[in-house]
Amino acid sequence: MFGPFKEYLEKELFDRFELQSRSIPPGLESNISDRGKNQATIQSWCYQSPELRKIRYTYIDAGETAQVFNSVIYPSHHYDVPFLGIDFLSFGKKKILVVLDFQPLFRDRAYQEKYIEPMREIRDRYNELAQNLEMKFYDANQYFSKYLLFAKTDPDTVVNRLFPAYQEYIQLYWETLAKAKPLTDPEDIQRIVKAQKDYDQYSAERDPAHGLFSSYFGAKWADKFLYEFLFEDASPLA
Ligand code: BLA
């Protein structure tokens, strides 16, 4: 279902950046759950480049029952650029949830103006993917922008609308990154380090996928996956 989205991101990354593999803790790169005929596999990839300190994406393939493509791109600590966040989920053909955003590190006016306003024009052309759904796990005002795509949708819309929207958001993200001025003041950089770490902590504590991971691969594996790979700068004891 989301294979072409993963391939597009991969090709873009390899064409544009000098990628180096970034290690994934042993046992977390992939896993297979065999519960009779409902086999589920999870696989993750992780890279870094001079401008992107962590690029991770994960694909869950449980056949008809679940297909998930999830990714976060973390810019290097000397850029205050938002994270690129992707979370596309399909549980059978009837329940498809898609979320795509430039996830802001800060919420002041100047930051919004610089990094979020440019998304508006794209978002306005994909109205049907911006449904203002209520969030149950996350606070929409915390690490989400006002121009996120967030929709319950169907397979046709995924192909015909989400795919072009996704390409446009990703192109805008590369442009944003290319324009960004590297920070040099250690205090500014420390502020980014803290903001990115806070995001990991917040996300690890709230991730609605914990139940999904636990049901396929067990609670122990799920905790490890969250705290040692997805959100490795979060502390399980905080
Ligand atoms: C919701 N994301 C969800 C849900 C799951 C995941 C299972 C709940 C779906 C439901 O309502 O039934 C899945 N989250 C994952 C997976 C991973 C993960 C598989 O971290 C990791 C491999 N979530 C993100 C990112 C964004 C995001 C990067 O991980 C930003 C674009 C958004 N996911 C997001 C939002 C919701 C969601 C906004 C709805 C949550 C809510 O209602 O509060």
Image: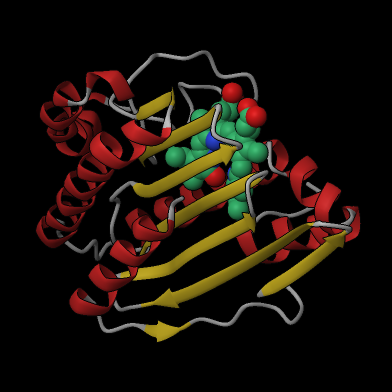
Q: Residue at x 17, y 45 (%)?
A: 168
Where does the image place residue 62, in percent across and percent down from the top left?
67, 54
Assign ligand 1 to one image quadrant.
top right
- Residue farthest toward the front in the current orientation of the protein: 37
Q: Nearer the viewer, residue 91 or 211?
A: 91
Q: Residue at x 57, y 49 (%)?
A: 67
Q: Is residue 117 above or below residue 38?
A: above
Count of numbered circles on the image: 0
Specify the color scheme: secondary structure
Q: Nearer the viewer, residue 29 or 3?
A: 3
Q: Is residue 199 above or below residue 153?
A: below
Instruction: Report the side of 191 relative to 232 (left or right).
Output: left
Where does the image place residue 163, in percent across and percent down from the top left?
27, 45
Q: Is residue 21 above or below residue 223?
A: below
Q: Residue at x 33, y 54 (%)?
A: 188
Where does the image place residue 142, in percent across and percent down from the top left?
49, 27
- Give residue 159's quadrant in the image: top left
- Give residue 12's quadrant in the image: bottom left
Q: Is residue 138 visible?
A: no
- Give residue 43's quadrant in the image: bottom right
